[in-house]
Amino acid sequence: SLHGLVAVLLIVLEWTRSGMPSVLKPVCDPRVLDRFIREAQDTEVAMVRLCLKCALSLSLTVPLTSVDFVAWDKKNVQEQAQEVQSGLWLLGKAIDVVRASVSNTALQSMLDNSYSNIHSIRQVIRTLNIQVSCGLDTRQVSSTPELFRVQTNFLRGKVRLLLSHAPACHRSSS
């Protein structure tokens, strides 16, 4: 979406300004993620209301959204980022599959926006300069409302946890 792109551009511009004292990065502002979560929730609700054929012709693989806080806290930032990036990649892939099968213009627009938002969040996480590889626990979904419920919960859970604890998101006195 245009809003997602603008948010990412503002984040990048803020980070690239030279001569500025080190302050909390815009990517770390919880209001940015809150906007993406609200849009995901709106899409989830709309899919329940507007989706004429909510069942998918095939099950899609999505990330698990539940968080075992003890296990999460034992992971280093790279492992957490790896889990989040892999989950976002799976969500983007699943949304793209649904996008290709929808002809309704209103639904298509929401799916395009959701896909764009997932891409924007992945770009934001890349700006944290955390090295990632792959690996993730997954599950299957068989309807579009279920897919967007997973997206909302993943953003609320693992993405929020990663951004709230990322080293780049802590104030520095330098």
Image (spheres, grey):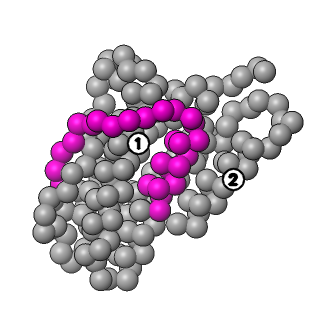
Q: Which residue is mark 1?
A: 85
Q: Residue at x 58, y 67 (%)?
A: 2
Left or right, residue 120 beside residue 23: left
Q: Where, by quadrant of the figure, is residue 4 drawn?
A: bottom right
Residue 132 in sight from this viewpoint? yes
Q: Secondary structure at mark 1?
A: helix
Crowding around mark 2 (Cα neighbors within 10 Å: few <14, some 14 to 19, many 20+) is some
Task: Locate residue 7, reporting x and y percent.
Answer: 62, 55
Crowding around mark 1 (Cα neighbors within 10 Å: few <14, some 14 to 19, many 20+) is many
> Is residue 95 a member of the stretch shown in magenta?
no
Task: Locate residue 154, reporting x and y percent.
Answer: 35, 44
What residue range appears in magenta? 116-141
Residue 131 drawn above or below residue 94: above
Q: Residue at x 57, y 35 (%)?
A: 129
View extreme (right): residue? 19
Q: Residue at x 53, y 49 (%)?
A: 123
Q: Where, by quadrant of the figure, is residue 46 drawn?
A: bottom left
Left or right, residue 29 beside residue 163: right
Residue flagged by tag 1: what amino acid is it?
Answer: Gln
- Mark sitting on residue 10: 2
Task: Locate residue 59, reporting x and y percent.
Answer: 14, 58
> Is residue 133 a member of the stretch shown in magenta?
yes
- Mark sitting on residue 26: none
